[in-house]
Amino acid sequence: MGKFDVFLKYLGKEDSHSPEEIRSKLELDKKTEEIESTNVEENLSKVDELLQTISQPEAVQKSSSLPPTQQAEEIDPEILKELERLDEPPPDISKLKEGLEIKSYEAEAPKEVEGEMVEIEMGKERKEEEEISVALPPEAVTEEKVAPEVKPETEEVVEEKVLPEMKTEEELDLSGMFAEITPSEATEETQLAITPEITPPLETEISEEFKLAEEVPEMERFKEEEKGVELEGIPTPGKEEIPSFEEMAFPEAESMAREEKPQEERTFTPAPEFKEERIEIDQEKALKIRNKINSFKDSKLRKRVREALIKSLLSKDVENELVKMLLLNESEIAIKNFINKYLPEEEVKPEKEIFEEKPKKRKVIYSEEIRKQKEVEKVLANFSRFSFIGFILVVLLGFVFWRYIWIPSVVEKIYKEGLSALNVKDTTTAEAKFERAKQLGGPNIKWYNIYGLKYMEIKNFEAARRKFLEALEYDPLNKLTIYNFANYYKNLYPPRFEDALNLLSRLYKKDPANFEYLDKFAQTYVEWGDWIKDSTEKLMKYAEADRLYENFLLKKPKYTGAYFRLLDIAIKLKKQERIDVLFDTIDKINKRAVNEKTFTDLARYYLDTQRYDRAKKVFEKLIPYLTPPSKTNYNMALLQSETYYEYGRFLTINLDFQKAIKVLSNSIMLNISNAKSYNLLGEIYLMDEKKMTSKFAAKEMFDNAIKYDPLYYKPYANMGHLYFYNSLNFADPEKAFSQAFYYYKIASSLLKDQGKDYLLSYNLGWLYYKYGDYESALQEFLKIYVDEPLNPILSYNMGNIFYTLRKYELAKTQYEKSIEYLENIASKIAYVNPEIVRHKELYTELARNYNNIGVIYLNLARNNPKQRAELEQLALLNFYKSKDNALKVNLLYEYAEYNIKIILNKGVKNRQPAFDKELVIKTSLKKFIDEFRENLIKNL
């Protein structure tokens, strides 16, 4: 028995074969070699001996070891007759086919007996196949053909008439030597004699290595389907199943049948010969090798050694060396190192488990089923591929959701909880929430700024500063953080503008050409100038900002944003000429360029300076740019509300009250707390003298203005006017004056830092005078006298106050000034009409002035006896002038009549002259004064 056969039989599985079985196999091998003799009779006797070995029990087999000469006498006569028939000429192939009978069988399932796997004996089937093999005459066998390795997916049905032509040496040589050997374990194939009449003799020797590569995988596949996994240590019988002709597929037979060519014309290419170096291993060595391999503790090593010997994965020399090591009982570590050296582990293919297949009813799979099976496999492959891709996508989407959606949402929730704690000034909880959110989501510059601004809102400036500093540590040039931190310094008291400039200079130095950075930097200088009270320092800060914008315009001369900033500075400095130049330059560069804040301030400046034509031009550019209140966003609402207010002022000055009311209503819609718009609406209602209901509407607007801005003086002043001129809701005028006096005093106290109001000061001075507070009255009149020294009404009022204070010379001066200006106006009247209110007021005021100056002369005469006569004559002259001016408008002036009688009737002693101490409440003389001023300017 060859070395390869021993390896294949005793190392293929870790089975425990008895010594008798091994000895029997070795003896059969020797007998097989003895058959290869040229003597026909001797071969027949050996065949008979082998057949008896297969069919007889073990005890009988021992007796079969007698010499061939003794066994020849026991050959069956039937076999001798068959052998004689083989020497005859070959029979007709058709007759042979008719006599051929193939019997299929169905083996019984293996039974389990005491934990051992018992294989089904295939004796009967083998006998039937032997009968078929022996029944074939030599002429029927043409030649031996070795089919290439073919692994069809399905079995094919082979017609019976082709079977005799397709028998190979494997099917024909079914002697007893293969009783316990599978088709893949056959060692030697018997050469069939081919008659010279049919084909030339062809001998093909197939080595065990070649046949193993072709047949062992097929048998292993059948065994896997039947047995599954074979347990180690469970002995199995030495018999194995050999498939019948019906279960074997012969592709060569089908192809030969389709060709339909004469047998004589067939040509065969001899199969390649594989010769193996035979090493005789006796029973003792085989058992020793098997036991040595089974003694290895490493199961992988056992498989690797067994597979290396069975599949001849090593060269012959290395293989012999391995066998020697196994026989010499080398250590497991030495053998493992040897295997790793010559056969790395990755090159050893995993051993397929060999199992016995239960003979089943043969199934035929047709081509349509194969096609469907392939389609299903293709669909499953695509499904697996797409399932894997889908799984990867799900994992990626899950990661993205977790990292960029779930984590940020949780972090934002924690930050908001901290802000809620800050709303109740719980800084400890807020800081704990902030730190937790930072650990979960990492530092977040946005939330650093939000918390910093919130701390500023609750006046915790130190905590706000820490938040901004921490944010700058993570990003020193973060724009948002720098802007908020700069505003933090500006909101301190006193503001720290230098620190704010140091922060903003980081961005400005980084990119000087960026107008946003420049604007933030320069505007800080402007804000610094607004805060400074000293005019010199204020101008210096404005000049620095102006320089920055001018330098920027040197590089970009048509950038309108810089011009708007320069215009803002010019408006603050009230440089009228520069304002006009800058406004015209912007209009020239871009007629559609509009800056709402700058143009609103510019319109206010033109209205305050009474340059209504320029104000109109500004509004023509600005108003179309404004959006309706319903579509204006919150950030622009406050600014546009202020713009609508200034436009309402412009319309009110031009007496377009209806349109002004609509515009001011838009202003209130955009900013419900705009007190100036409420106040201006009230003034418009107050000027409507036709409707009494408008006075109540005016009062409602003034109340709203006071509600939304308690520090705004104008609604208080207007409420005073409402009571002063209309005695609203009071039957007694004295009570109305008292209410007006209350509002006027509040308005005057709020007006200290907001400029001057002529009507407020005049009416408050009048009320102070009425209630006997002459000093306060004088102070109120002096506020407006500085700006209007030519006002005759103010001179008359001040004259009365000086007279009451016994300052006769000062009083006399004021009366003379008033008389001078009133006489100049009267001289321009060619015809006096008493029905004209202006004429009546003018001459009445002249009468009062002449009367009061006459009283001053009369008092001086009493105090100066030496000049008494002269002073009395001057007093009498002024009393007559007073009487004459009153008569011009058909007025009997009692004060002058009484004073004339006192002077003319000297017998009446201790009589005091009548002094007219009444002050004018409502007069239209201002119109005459304005006309006088205009005429005076024209004459100059």
Image (spheres, grey):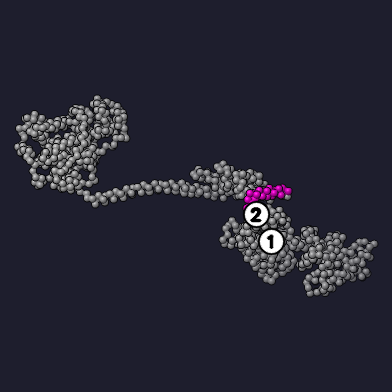
**Residue at horizontal 66 percent and vertical 46 percent from the top:** 497
Query: Which residue corresponds to the image point at 18% horizontal and 40% vertical from the top-left?
Result: 268
Q: Is residue 173 visible?
A: no
Q: Is 617 included in the stretch rendered in magenta?
A: no
Residue 779 image-quadrant placement:
bottom right
Q: Report helix, strand or loop for mark 1.
A: helix
Q: Is residue 418 above or below residue 65?
A: below
Closer to us: 449 or 196: 196
Seen at 86% across and 67% down, the residue is 850
Q: Residue furthest right?
A: 866
Q: Quick one: label 2, few (<14), some, or many (20+) residues within 10 Å?
A: many
Q: Quadrant of the C terminus?
A: bottom right
Tell me residue 537's x, y (percent).
Answer: 72, 47
What is the quadrant of the N terminus in the image? top left
Tag 2 secondary structure? helix
User: Looking at the image, which is closer to me, 351 or 37?
Assistant: 37
Q: Main secondary structure of the magenta part?
A: helix
The numbered dot on residue 564 is: 2
Side of 928 where 10 appears, left or right: left
Residue flagged by tag 1: what amino acid is it? Arg
Tell me the number on the disc at residue 573.
none
Q: Considering only order in the chain, which callout, 2 or 1, is on the residue closer to the N terminus?
A: 2
Identify whether 610 is placed above or below 169.
below
List x then y, in percent, for residue 807.
Answer: 85, 59
- Residue identified by numbered label 1: 614
Tell me which amino acid carries mark 2. Phe
For this orientation, the residue located farthest to the front is 265
Instruction: Give the magenta range.
Output: 536-564
